[in-house]
Image (cartoon, grey):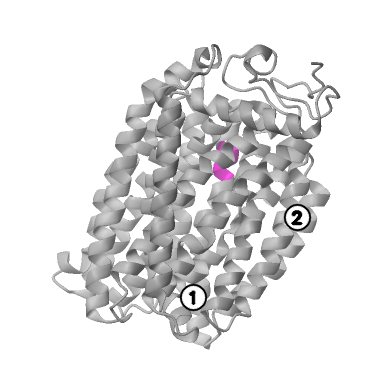
């Protein structure tokens, strides 16, 4: 079969100005695309009261309502982007769609309206992260990709910072929470237009894996498959392309453990993001500027931490490719201690609010500084381990399992709080216990998993896993069994959450 797949580049030749413009637009689009969760987090009490929700309803909105759609639709959209070599076009259409859905969320008046709007928004949000990381991994040389992706993930922390200021300003002026969503949707539409006009599709960069023929040998079916080949119908080409990517990730020794570890790390972070602002506001009711300062700490310290992770990885790139895994594992374990100190800061201060707040801000800064080095560095490493012409699809697979696992956090917490009124002392105590369990456990499971994955990544970097025939081994059987168990748990948890929503 003739291979018409575009050739790869060992070092991208993209002008600095275009890299800068592309990074800024990708950052803005990513920041805005996940901004709705910050609105739900910082305005939790307002959302619950204005839409007549209960705790289970809120858990549905912040859990699997978008998580399932997000996870499943990321696969076909990411594959389409790889197959058509039109990542920028797909990203633009996705941005236009989620922007419209954000506006509809702001116009919602009850649970079912905002639920449907969030589900629809998940369609547009689904490919944004995978497409953005994929594009960045081809815009610059490999050692710089880690810092470039870290710039992208600064959007997570800037979102927290901006949300904190908006929450305080809206509270002081009695501005409805949904105005923020409408504004985000309008700005998103504008950014989508600029993404299409100014971001260009870069040439694909070679992988970290030493492989032949821009892929694995043809006889094993793992090389890049061209959509232009005339020897097969389009359906057969699509099937073979999907099969080749799946075979590649199944062969990787480290992919399963890295994915599960990242999922539990995200679970702890997801619960933290959705419930910590509201918990701290109720814990310190006299601190009217708490959310503002909370947002500033997250924005400044989180941004510094994630950029530091990318920069350190780039600096030691020639010596080791494994620093992101050490940073994530050890940093998360240390951070879990500071998270516990945050949660019990008022108790440590013997219920003195002024002393408690001082402990809170100090431990929170240390928690973010130690925990948040990982996002850009780890996701860049995964992108560079995947086959170049299907890396977006591979990143979507990587995200799929993570989303299905970490979206369970808000669902579990919502169920735990279902019979408790928001704002009461019982609600505060239950929330504290749940956060004190879910966040540290998630961080420690992730830490142990990343450390155990290090020798497996070393072996994968040698590239020997791409050769040989793929048989029905324990690895392949374990993948199917694990997928079935995960799907059953997700479905059961989602059904239970919808049932208790009433």
At label 2, counting other C-alpha atoms closer than 10 Å, the crowd grade (few under 14, some 14-19, many 20 or more) is some
| Residue receiving disc 1 | 167
- Placement of the C terminus among the 4 image quadrants: bottom left
Asked if residue 184 can be seen in this view, the reply is: no
Q: Which mark is residue 112?
A: none
Taking the view exactly as shown, the residue that stands out farthest to the bottom is 174
In this rendering, is residue 71 above or below 43? above
**Circle 1: element type:** helix
Mark toward the start of the polypeptide (1 vs 2) = 2
Identified at 45% across, 68% down, the residue is 60
How far apart are the two marked residues, 1 and 2, measured between alpha carbons? Answer: 30 Å
In this rendering, is residue 378 above or below 21? above
Residue 307 lies in the magenta-colored region: no
Hey, which quadrant is residue 177 in on the image? Answer: bottom right
Residue 305 position in % (x across, y down)? 44, 45
**Circle 2: element type:** helix
Residue 299 position in % (x across, y down)? 48, 58
Left or right placement of residue 227 versus residue 167 in this view = right
At label 1, counting other C-alpha atoms closer than 10 Å, the crowd grade (few under 14, some 14-19, many 20 or more) is many
| Residue receiving disc 2 | 93
Taking the view exactly as shown, the residue that stands out farthest to the left is 350
Magenta region, residue range: 147-151
Residue 145 position in % (x across, y down)? 60, 33
Secondary structure of the magenta portion, mostly? helix
Residue 356 position in % (x across, y down)? 23, 68
């Amino acid at each position: 079969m003739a291979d018409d797949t575009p050739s790869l580049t060992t070092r991208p030749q993209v002008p600095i100005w275009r890299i800068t413009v592309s990074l800024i637009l990708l950052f803005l689009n990513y920041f805005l695309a996940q901004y709705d969760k910050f609105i739900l987090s910082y305005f939790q009490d307002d959302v619950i009261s204005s839409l007549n929700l209960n705790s289970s309803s809120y858990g549905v909105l912040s859990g699997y309502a978008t998580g399932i759609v997000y996870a499943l639709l990321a696969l076909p959209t990411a594959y389409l982007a790889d197959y058509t070599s039109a990542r920028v076009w797909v990203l633009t259409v996705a941005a236009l769609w989620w922007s419209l859905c954000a506006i509809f969320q702001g116009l919602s008046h009850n649970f079912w309206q905002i639920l449907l709007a969030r589900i629809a928004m998940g369609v547009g949000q689904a490919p944004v992260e995978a497409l953005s990381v994929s594009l960045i991994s081809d815009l610059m040389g490999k050692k710089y990709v880690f810092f470039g992706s870290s710039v992208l993930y600064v959007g997570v922390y800037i979102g927290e910072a901006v949300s904190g200021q908006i929450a305080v300003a809206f509270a002081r002026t009695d501005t409805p929470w949904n105005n923020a969503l409408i504004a985000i949707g309008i700005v998103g539409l504008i950014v989508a237009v600029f993404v299409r006009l100014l971001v260009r599709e870069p040439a694909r960069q070679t992988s970290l894996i030493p492989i032949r023929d821009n892929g694995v040998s043809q006889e094993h079916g793992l090389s890049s498959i061209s959509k232009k080949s005339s020897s097969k119908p389009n359906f057969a080409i699509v099937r073979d392309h999907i099969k080749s990517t799946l075979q590649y990730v199944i062969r990787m020794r480290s992919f399963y453990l890295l994915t599960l570890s990242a999922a539990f790390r995200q679970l702890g972070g997801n619960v933290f993001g959705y419930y910590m602002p509201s918990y701290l506001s109720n814990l310190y009711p006299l601190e009217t500027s708490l959310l503002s300062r909370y947002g500033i700490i997250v924005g400044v310290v989180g941004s510094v931490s994630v950029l530091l992770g990318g920069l350190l990885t780039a600096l030691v790139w020639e010596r080791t490719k494994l620093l992101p895994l050490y940073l994530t594992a050890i940093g998360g374990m240390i951070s879990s201690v500071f998270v516990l100190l945050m949660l019990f800061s008022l108790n440590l201060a013997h219920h003195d609010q002024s002393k408690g707040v001082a402990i809170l801000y100090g431990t929170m800064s240390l928690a973010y500084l130690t925990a948040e080095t990982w996002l850009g560095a780890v996701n860049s490493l995964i992108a560079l381990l995947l086959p170049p012409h299907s890396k977006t699809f591979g990143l979507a697979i990587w995200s799929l399992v993570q989303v299905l696992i970490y979206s369970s956090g808000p669902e579990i917490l919502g169920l735990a709080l279902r019979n408790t009124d928001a704002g009461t002392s019982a609600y505060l105590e239950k929330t504290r216990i749940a956060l004190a369990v879910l966040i540290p456990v998630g961080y420690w499971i992730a830490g142990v998993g990343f450390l155990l994955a290090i020798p497996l990544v070393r072996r994968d970097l040698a590239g020997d896993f791409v050769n040989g025939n793929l048989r029905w081994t324990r690895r392949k059987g374990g993948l199917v069994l694990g997928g079935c168990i995960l799907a059953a748990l997700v479905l059961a948890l989602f059904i239970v959450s919808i049932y208790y929503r009433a």
